[in-house]
Image (spheres, rainbow, N blue to C red):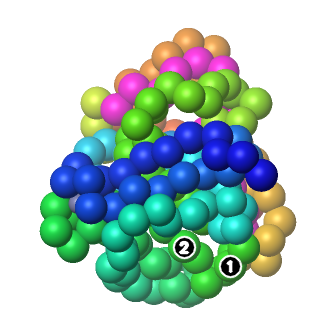
């Protein structure tokens, strides 16, 4: 399989390549991802783990137990410059999530509503903007038993407010999620 794209950390010690296009892109606004990125949300591009190859350097990893699933999440980062590069999951061992902002060309793959989802509206910070037409989940897209939660779609861009989070909670309760 040929290399589709390369990326790396800020200092250049760690370089990687991916050998397929991302299967999904998850824009996750959960508290974990806010803290991990220092921003409103993490843009995580998902790949089969076998399609991610480390070209140089050795990432360190930090393991957290997810509050939602109770399973381990592994954050892989450069211990020289602190850049987070990808995640791995106890729950989904054969996939990984590459931090989309670490690709050399952040625009090498499309981010359309067919492949791009917003997770954890219930935790997104005030002022974050969600574009129209994307599936937006109150929490994760999957319940702990693996079945699907019900997403919302907005007809126009929306700004996250306490009222929007409250409405999302009510939507989730009505749909058996929360
Ligand atoms: Zn680095
Ligand atoms: Zn998250």
Residue for point 26% across, 45% down: 39
User: Residue 100: horizontal and vertical position, in percent?
Assistant: 46, 43
- Sequence-first disc among 2 and 1: 2
Q: Is residue 118 above or below residue 127?
A: below
Residue for point 33% across, 79% down: 60
Q: Mark 2 sits on what residue?
A: 88
The residue lying toward the viewer, choosing from 27 and 124, is 27
Q: Mark 1 sits on what residue?
A: 93
Sort mark 2 into few (<14), some (14-19) or many (20+) by Cα contacts within 10 Å: many
SS for callout 2? strand
Cβ atoms under marks 2 and 1 closer than 8 Å: yes
Q: Quadrant of the C terminus?
A: bottom right
Left or right placement of residue 115 versus residue 82 in this view: right
Sort mark 1 into few (<14), some (14-19) or many (20+) by Cα contacts within 10 Å: few
Q: Can residue 119 be seen in this view?
A: no
> What is the span of residues highlighted in magenta in the rendered image?
128-143
Q: Is residue 134 magenta?
A: yes
Residue for point 49% across, 17% down: 157
User: Residue 137: horizontal and vertical position, in percent?
Assistant: 62, 47
């Amino acid at each position: 399989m040929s290399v589709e794209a390369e990326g790396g950390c800020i200092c250049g010690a760690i370089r990687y390549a991916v050998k397929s296009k991302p299967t999904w892109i998850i824009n996750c606004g959960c508290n974990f991802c806010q803290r991990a990125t220092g921003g409103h949300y993490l843009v995580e591009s998902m790949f089969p783990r076998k399609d991610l190859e480390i070209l140089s350097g050795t990432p360190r990893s930090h393991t957290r137990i997810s509050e939602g699933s109770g399973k381990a999440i592994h954050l892989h980062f450069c211990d020289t410059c602190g850049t987070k590069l990808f995640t791995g999951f106890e729950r989904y061992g054969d996939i990984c999530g590459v931090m989309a902002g670490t690709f050399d060309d952040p625009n090498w793959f499309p981010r359309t509503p067919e492949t791009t989802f917003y997770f954890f509206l219930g935790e997104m910070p005030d002022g974050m903007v969600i574009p129209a037409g994307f599936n937006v989940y109150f929490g994760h897209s999957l319940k702990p038993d693996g079945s699907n939660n019900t997403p919302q779609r907005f007809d126009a861009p929306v700004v996250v407010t306490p009222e929007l989070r409250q409405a999302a909670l009510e939507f989730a309760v009505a749909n058996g999620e929360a």
